[in-house]
């Protein structure tokens, strides 16, 4: 069943962005917060929120949503709380669609092990890329499916090492689609912080160690690219 309602746990800069992006895609969107601080912040922004705790009592969810048509976003500030929340929800609802946010690769692995269907990095670069792409209506639906629905496609950030075969080359020297069957979305110049060089803009960026590639593709293809970029294998 396609999801028609969404529950977002947490009210912070990331959950605000999620709310903004999905509010037109689901007919019923609910926000659940852990503490009074987030509750007041939500109310001040005109967002109706309900408090919850990390117990296994999800009656409020069942009262408000059709769980079979529900997608949940675990967007709490603390990764450990997101892991606990994911475990609790998965233990109660075997088939619930759970999307969790994680701050780093270690937390991403924990979220997946806890039962999340999708784990999204909350690093600024990924958030900015997602935000930029979502601002383009023609690909919004496609990206929504990639990020939120049950899909084998993923977005991956890959840091270029100083020993990488990419180091010292130019962006157009490598044919990512032809050679690796992935689409390169952007490169983040490590010397410029979070400044993007979008592949679609045609800028032939000179790649240095520390730059970060942001690519979309099937997981096994991305993993193969990651190993090659790190000089581990072709």
Image (tube, rainbow, N blue to C red):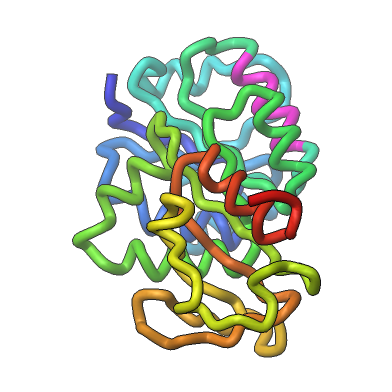
* Residue found at the very far left of the displayed protein: 138
Quarter-of-image position of residue 184: bottom left
Front-lying residue, 54 or 99: 99
Q: Position of residue 96 (x, y in %)?
A: 48, 19
Magenta portion: prevailing SS class: helix
**164 above or below 38?**
below
Give, as a single range, the part of the protein colored magenta.
81-90
Q: Residue at x 32, y 28 (%)?
A: 3
Please state, as top left, top right, bottom left or bottom right, where the N terminus lies in the image.
Answer: top left
Residue 153: say if magenta: no
Q: Position of residue 67 (x, y in %)?
A: 41, 18
Q: Residue at x 22, y 62 (%)?
A: 137
Q: Residue at x 65, y 62 (%)?
A: 123
Quarter-of-image position of residue 159: bottom right
**54 above or below 121?**
above
Q: Left or right? Give the position of 23 relative to 104.
A: left
Front-lying residue, 133 or 212: 212
Q: Residue at x 72, y 53 (%)?
A: 103
**26 above or below 206?**
above
Q: Position of residue 198 (x, y in %)?
A: 44, 77
Q: Position of residue 128 (x, y in %)?
A: 51, 69
> Is residue 211 in view from this perspective?
yes
Front-lying residue, 14 or 180: 180
Q: Left or right? Give the position of 103 relative to 199.
A: right
């Amino acid at each position: 069943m396609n999801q028609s309602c969404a529950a977002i746990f947490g009210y912070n800069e990331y959950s605000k962005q999620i709310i903004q992006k999905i509010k037109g895609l689901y007919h019923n969107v609910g926000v659940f917060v852990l503490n009074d601080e987030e509750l007041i912040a939500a109310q001040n922004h005109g967002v109706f929120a309900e408090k919850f705790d990390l117990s296994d009592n999800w009656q409020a969810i069942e009262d408000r949503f059709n769980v079979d048509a529900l997608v949940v976003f675990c967007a709490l500030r603390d990764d450990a709380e997101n892991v606990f929340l994911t475990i609790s929800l998965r233990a109660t609802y075997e088939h619930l669609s759970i999307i969790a946010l994680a701050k780093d690769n270690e937390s991403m692995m924990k979220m997946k092990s806890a039962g999340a269907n999708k784990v999204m990095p909350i690093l600024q670069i990924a958030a900015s890329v997602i935000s930029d792409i979502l601002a383009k209506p023609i690909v919004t639906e496609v990206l929504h499916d990639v990020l939120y629905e049950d899909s084998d496609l993923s977005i991956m950030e890959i840091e270029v090492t100083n020993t990488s075969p990419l180091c010292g080359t130019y962006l157009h020297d490598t044919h990512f689609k032809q050679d690796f069957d992935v689409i390169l979305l952007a490169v983040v110049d490590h010397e410029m912080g979070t400044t993007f060089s979008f592949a679609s803009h045609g800028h032939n960026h000179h790649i240095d160690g520390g730059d970060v590639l942001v690519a979309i593709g099937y997981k096994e293809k991305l993993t193969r690219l990651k190993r090659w970029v790190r000089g581990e294998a072709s």
